[in-house]
Amino acid sequence: MRAIVQHEYGPPDALRLEDVAKPVPKDDQVLVRVEAAAIHVGDWFLTQGVPYIMRLGTGLRKPRKRVPGFDVAGRVEAVGKDVTTFAEGDEVFGEASSGSCADFATAAEDKLALKPADLTFEQSAAVPVSGVTALRGIRDSGKVEQGQKVLVNGATGGVGVYAVQIAKALGAEVTAVCSTDNLDLARSLGADHVVDYTREDFTKSAQRYDLILDNVGNRPLAECRRALTDNGVHIPNSGRSQGRWVGPLGRMSKAALGSVVSRNQGRPYYSPVKRQELLDLTAFIESGSLTPVIDRTYPLAETPAAMEYVGLGHVAGKTVIAL
């Protein structure tokens, strides 16, 4: 089968289109014929091999996972002997165990769900990792309620486009922070207010928020907390620090420590893809309150160009690979 393969850490041109063996699903896995995959910033970090501390889990000298991509949408080709949820031919979406930038990928049964009927494969592939991350940040960690004021920093990025829509669906008054070019997109997602970060610093405004979901990390934690109500919470979600040793993990560690002494500082949260969250996102999609946003679509052979585009940090929504 065709697959994008990475033999060493480095820039996107380290990725190569090669013929490799088709993966074999384990007893609790599904083999998916990939129709579409999606690239997010985590894939870019893994390709680069930075921050270096990440290599303790991904491989010190070269990546253990040679095929990039987690988000996947496609058709079930085969199932392991313990799989009961899916059958051959089912259209599914979720998170792949083997890399999704390939003709075939394996996925754990509990990390897949049936594809939303009204979405294309490309739209479905744009949902899993970023959609679940937004859902956990807004609904679970943020505990957003009707009438609360929510600010999403990085509102038109991969996670932000879902966070704005989910917050609105839960009844919040949403302020979206993004660049000048993406103000109209933020409004189309349902944002009640938009802030152009090139002209205004939301931490210096008189407005106060019950929740700040911070997908960017471009303001000091203390300044973000000053933009909160008395019981408001700032929740960090990664960030784009250029430090090569610890990268955004440094800021996340500071937030975790800060949460011990400040009720306004939320802890970083972990958001593994599970079927229940995929089903919850499907319910939002089917109700009309959540729509994937795709910035660009690339063919499999142009995955290196897609990865380079993601690495620039200006993607509006998701970058998708169509097979």
Image (cartoon, rainbow, N blue to C red):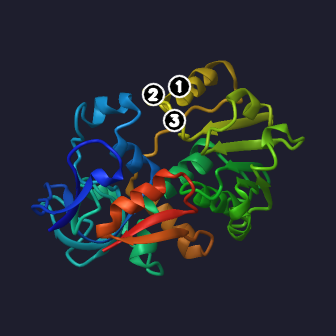
Mark identifier at residue 113: none
Q: Which residue is drawn at 79% across and 43% down?
A: 202
Q: Is residue 313 above or below residue 79?
A: above
Q: Mark 2 points at which residue?
A: 246
Q: Which residue is drawn at 54% across and 71% down?
A: 285
* SS at mark 3 in the image: loop
Q: Name the residue under label 3.
A: 242
* SS at mark 1 in the image: helix
The answer to whether any part of residue 35 appears in the image is yes
In this rendering, the label closer to the viewer, 1 or 3: 3
Residue 281's x, y, as percent?
51, 63
State the CA–CA distance, disc 1 to disc 2.
10 Å
State the CA–CA distance, disc 3 to disc 2.
9 Å
Q: Name the residue under label 1.
A: 253
Q: Which residue is drawn at 68% across and 29% down?
A: 221
Q: Which amino acid does label 2 sit on?
A: Val
Q: In which quarter of the image is the C terminus?
A: bottom left
C-beta proximity under 8 Å, tags 1 and 2: yes
Q: Which amino acid does label 3 sit on?
A: Gln
- Local packing at callout 3 (Cα closer than 10 Å; few below 14, some 14-19, many 20+) is few
Among the two numbered marks 1 and 3 on one chain, the one whose residue lies closer to the N terminus: 3
Among the two numbered marks 1 and 2 on one chain, the one whose residue lies closer to the N terminus: 2
Q: Which residue is drawn at 80% across and 62% down?
A: 192
- Local packing at callout 2 (Cα closer than 10 Å; few below 14, some 14-19, many 20+) is some
Q: In this view, does 130 lie above or below 65?
A: below
Q: With 19 as the anchor, is 209 left or right in this view?
A: right
Q: With 67 as the anchor, is 233 left or right in this view?
A: right
